[in-house]
């Protein structure tokens, strides 16, 4: 009986994720945020200079320490539609997300970035990725990522915590001056 309940629960989560994935592919939804939220998402200029920590240090911060990483793993299915998450993963529609934290935006060798992302002057940190995931088209207008975003901040925290956990936890970075 317990297994049947768990299976039904898993199926509901999978169905929800599938619905989100399908909606993410629909370019008509790319600007789903209403004009009343226009100022809620910082743009990339807000992240031109920031302190960059190791993945382990980020995972100790409150938002990521308490985040549901299992839920983040399920949410990462949306990312896997276009991005590899594992070390030495293939370049798909988007660059690999393995080792993304601490990386200069638009800098992964071998990926053909949009001109706006290739010339961006920020470093990928959890804060930058959080703003990107909230509304990619508002964070960096002109980028080619066809994804509506993730409106719920708890979901974004869970996804980011999962990416931090599965990323390069041995990265030892310091202060990034991305100007």
Image: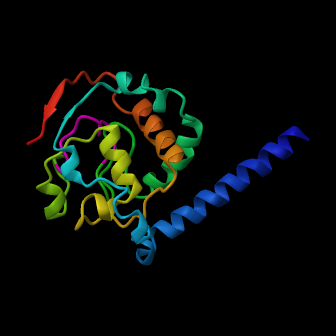
Pinpoint residue 59: horizontal percent, then vertical percent: 42, 26
Residue at the image point whose x is 33% and y is 40% from the top: 127
Please identify the residue farthest to the left as the structure is shown. 179
Viewed as shown, does residue 115 lie left or right of 23? left
Q: What span is in magenta?
A: 96-106
Report the magenta stretch's main SS.
loop
The relative height of residue 36 versus residue 28 in the rendered view (above or below) is above
> Magenta segment: does it hold 130?
no
Residue at the image point whose x is 33% and y is 29% from the top: 168
Pinpoint residue 162: horizontal percent, then vertical percent: 47, 36
Pinpoint residue 143: horizontal percent, then vertical percent: 24, 64
On the image, which quarter does residue 81 sit in? bottom left
The relative height of residue 51 versus residue 79 in the rendered view (above or below) is above
The relative height of residue 122 versus residue 141 in the rendered view (above or below) is above
Viewed as shown, does residue 123 lie left or right of 150? left
Pinpoint residue 95: horizontal percent, then vertical percent: 28, 51
Color scheme of the displayed model: rainbow
Please identify the residue farthest to the bottom as the structure is shown. 28
Locate the N terminus by quadrant: top right
Locate the C terminus by quadrant: top left
Residue placed most toward the observer, 82 or 60:
60
Residue at the image point whose x is 65% and y is 55% from the top: 14
> Magenta segment: does it hold 97?
yes
On the image, which quarter does residue 58 sit in? top left
């Amino acid at each position: 009986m317990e297994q049947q309940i768990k299976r039904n629960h898993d199926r509901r989560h999978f169905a929800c994720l599938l619905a989100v994935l399908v909606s993410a592919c629909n370019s008509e939804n790319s600007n789903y945020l209403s004009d009343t939220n226009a100022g809620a998402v910082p743009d990339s200029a807000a992240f031109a200079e920031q302190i960059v920590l190791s993945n382990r240090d980020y995972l100790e911060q409150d938002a990521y320490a308490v985040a549901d990483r299992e839920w983040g793993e399920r949410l990462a299915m949306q990312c896997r539609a276009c991005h590899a998450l594992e070390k030495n993963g293939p370049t798909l529609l988007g660059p690999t997300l393995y080792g993304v934290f601490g990386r200069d935006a638009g800098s992964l060798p071998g990926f053909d970035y949009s001109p706006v992302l290739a010339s961006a002057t920020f470093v990928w940190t959890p804060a930058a990725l959080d703003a990107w995931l909230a509304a990619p088209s508002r964070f960096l207008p002109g980028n080619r990522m066809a994804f509506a975003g993730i409106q719920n901040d708890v979901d974004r925290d869970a996804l980011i915590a999962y990416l931090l956990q599965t990323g390069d936890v041995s990265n030892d970075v310091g202060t990034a001056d991305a100007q």
